Image (tube, rainbow, N blue to C red):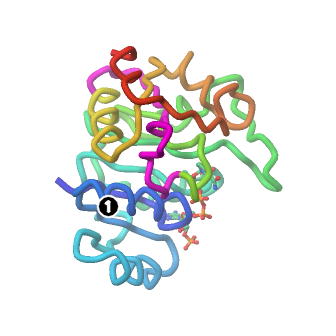
């Protein structure tokens, strides 16, 4: 099954590059200009299909890579999707106008996102690194670059951890959103913006 990506900006493109390098197929959608995802398909080859939000949103794993202020609009565009049991990967950071922290009513941001997607198994991931690092080969001479993830559904966390590892990163599962989500949340979480490299052999210590 291909991976649906909603948002063909810096993060969506970086993840498409890494997933394709891992042999996955991706279906990428953009909001205004389908030309952008078509150009991406031309540049990145046949594993990438340019699509509408609705089409990307039907995949079993759907990555949300849109700005926080456009989330509701993106979810509305995918409205015909039945999210039940499907995995949604939330890369978003809760930033309002002028990059000020969005008002979350004290909740972790991914709980707010999960509230927009009834029945989905939400996994927060890929939000702590800038796009240039996300799109770079995660296998460095010092070891594998770490991707943090968190979510309230261990099976979904496991599926995304598997995808993360197949794409070459080291996966660190921080557990449920209430704890782990807050740790990786930007702004404010202590793990946000950290680039960690797991030295060779150390991954066995995580399981
Ligand atoms: N930049 C970072 O350092 C970084 C790192 C990790 C995570 N994040 C988070 O990742 C998310 C994406 O960031 P980004 O840097 O990739 O932003 P970006 O470069 O501005 O790209 C956002 C993409 O989302 C698309 N989009 C907007 N509304 C949409 C909608 N309703 N339906 C479908 N696509 C829509 C935009 O398309 P149009 O331009 O056509 O509207 C654009 O292609 C944000 O929530 C951000 O906080 C950012």
- Highlighted range, magenta: 134-155
Q: Kindly identify the residue that appears in the image at 61 percent across and 56 percent down.
A: 67
Residue 40: name its quadrant.
Answer: bottom left
Residue 165 in percent (x, y) is at: 32, 38
Q: Report whether 185 appears left or right of 180.
A: right
Residue 122 in percent (x, y) is at: 40, 34
Q: Kindly identify the residue that appears in the image at 33 percent across and 36 percent down.
A: 160
Up-down relation of residue 196 to residue 49 (above or below): above
User: Which residue is disc 1 drawn over?
Assistant: 56
Q: Is residue 147 magenta?
A: yes
Up-down relation of residue 207 to residue 148 (above or below): above
Image quarter in which the C terminus is found: top left
Q: Report whether 69 appears left or right of 149.
A: right
Q: Nearer the viewer, residue 157 or 101?
A: 157
| Ligand 1 quarter of the rendering | bottom right
Q: Report whether 89 appears left or right of 93.
A: left
Q: Kindly identify the residue that appears in the image at 75 percent across and 49 percent down.
A: 96
Q: Kindly identify the residue that appears in the image at 62 percent across and 51 percent down.
A: 130
Residue 88 in percent (x, y) is at: 37, 42
SS for tag 1?
helix
Residue 27: name its quadrant.
Answer: bottom left
Q: Is residue 143 magenta?
A: yes
Q: Nearer the viewer, residue 29 or 117?
A: 29
Residue 28 in percent (x, y) is at: 36, 66
């Amino acid at each position: 099954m291909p991976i649906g990506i909603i948002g063909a900006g810096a993060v969506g493109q970086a993840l498409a590059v890494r997933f394709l390098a891992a042999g996955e197929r991706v279906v990428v959608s953009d909001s205004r200009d389908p030309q952008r995802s078509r150009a991406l398909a031309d540049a990145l080859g046949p594993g990438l299909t340019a699509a509408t939000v609705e089409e990307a949103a039907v995949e079993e794993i759907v990555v949300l890579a849109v700005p926080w202020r456009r989330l509701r609009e993106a979810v509305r565009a995918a409205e015909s999707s039945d999210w039940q049991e499907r995995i949604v990967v939330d890369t978003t950071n809760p930033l309002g106008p002028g990059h000020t922290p969005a008002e979350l009513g004290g909740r972790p941001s991914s709980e707010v996102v999960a509230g927009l997607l009834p029945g989905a198994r939400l996994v927060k991931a890929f939000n702590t690194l800038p796009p240039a690092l996300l799109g770079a080969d995660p296998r460095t001479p010092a070891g594998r670059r770490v991707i943090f993830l968190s979510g309230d559904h261990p099976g979904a966390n496991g599926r995304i951890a598997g995808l993360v590892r197949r794409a070459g990163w080291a996966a660190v599962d921080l557990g449920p959103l209430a704890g782990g989500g807050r740790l990786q949340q930007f702004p404010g979480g202590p793990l946000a913006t950290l680039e960690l490299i797991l030295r060779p052999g150390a991954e066995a210590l995580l399981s």
